[in-house]
Amino acid sequence: MKALFIGGTGTISDAITRQLLEQGCELYLLNRGNRNDDLPKNAHILQADINDEEKVAGLIADLEFDVVADFIAFVPEHLERDYRLFNGKTKQFIFISSASAYQSPPSDYRITEGTPLANPYWEYSRNKIACEDYLMKQYREQGFPITIVRPSHTYSERSIPLGVHGSKGSWQVVRRMLDNKPVIIHGDGTSLWTLTHSEDFAKGFIGLMGNIHALGESVHITSDESVTWNQIHEVIASVVGVRLNAVHVASEFLDACSPEDYRGSLLGDKANTVVFDNTKLKRLVPEFVATIRVDQGIRRTVQHILDHPELQQEDPEFDAWCDRVIEALDQAAAQIKSGK
């Protein structure tokens, strides 16, 4: 198979890249070269900014592909560019959308590909929906051979999967655990969530590549395991050998007092219970099964970050914000109790 990835070194795509190269795929990566040093040497690098359409067109002028996948398209204009570049040059174009595009809040906790796409809380998700609409139009009217993939919360060794964390990454939450400071969990921590390790995601994704039955289809790729946010935090605390000191805070309150977009990432996504039905994926890729349990995957991730101090990025602003939120809740409770 001859494939081109736009990106190819991110949280989701890195595992796919490595597994394909191990399988002998002729793989081209089109990116700016910022994270290519750790890639296996048998990857073909096309170094360019995908937005430099003229340069990219020159680089691929004599190339045709079985699969082109764009991991860094977020608005319809990105797909319009891709259509101009790759129409007639690939047998399959895969767009990485998002499971956050599904109806939020969901009318049914069980999510299938037939669940409506509607997210009034998060612009990111609405842009992904618009991207899907554009591609389906090109498929129906022009025969552009598209497949839409919807990841949910996919993680790797680079970042610990959490719901509430600082913009610089999730290390500060672990730091708070190590310092025996209270850790904020949105809601009451009992809503169900699905985490998928990138290595498992890669198996499903590769199974869709070159798959004639996947053309014109939208497919989500997730684990079948459902866990609560309390369980996720308990696993992290267990790995670092501390007792979890959890403080549960309503998602609406977090959104109201945070500079981060918790309206989108919490109210429009992680605050909702969702359980994914992977029947369609398993019909298209019968061999797919997610084998890395949450406790196993998080243990690997946390240990990797502990072993690599350069990944332990402090976020004092987020740390101070957590302290202020918790103090405000304590003061409010004390005031109400006192009757003042």
Image (spheres, rainbow, N blue to C red):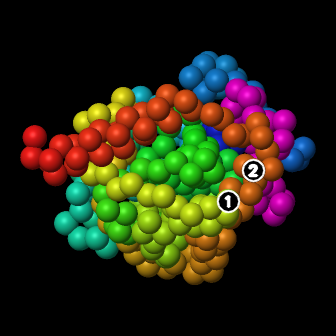
Residue pointed to by mark 2: 306
* Residue located 90% across and 44% down the image: 41
Q: How many residues crowd around disc 2 within 10 Å: few (fewer than 14), some, or many (20 or more)?
A: some
Residue pointed to by mark 1: 240
Q: Is residue 152 left or right of residue 2?
A: left
* Residue located 48% across and 43% down the image: 165
Q: In the depicted view, which residue is nearer to us: 97 or 68?
A: 97
User: Is residue 221 shown in magenta?
Assistant: no
User: Is residue 18 shown in magenta?
Assistant: yes
Q: Amino acid at mark 2?
A: Leu
Q: Which residues are magenta?
A: 15-39
Q: Is residue 55 left or right of residue 176?
A: right
Q: Is residue 138 visible?
A: no
Residue positioned most to the right: 41
Q: In the depicted view, which residue is nearer to us: 96 or 276?
A: 276
Query: Please, what secondary structure does the residue beneath circle 1 have?
Result: loop
Cα distance between the residues tagged 2 and 1 = 9 Å
* Residue located 52% across and 48% down the image: 181
Query: Please, what secondary structure does the residue beneath circle 2 have?
Result: helix
Residue positioned most to the left: 339
Work out whether 102 lies above or below 339: below
Work out whether 181 lies above or below 258: below
Circles 2 and 1: CB distance less than 8 Å? yes
Q: How many residues crowd around disc 1 within 10 Å: few (fewer than 14), some, or many (20 or more)?
A: some
Residue 167 rendering spot, x and y as whole percentages: 51, 34
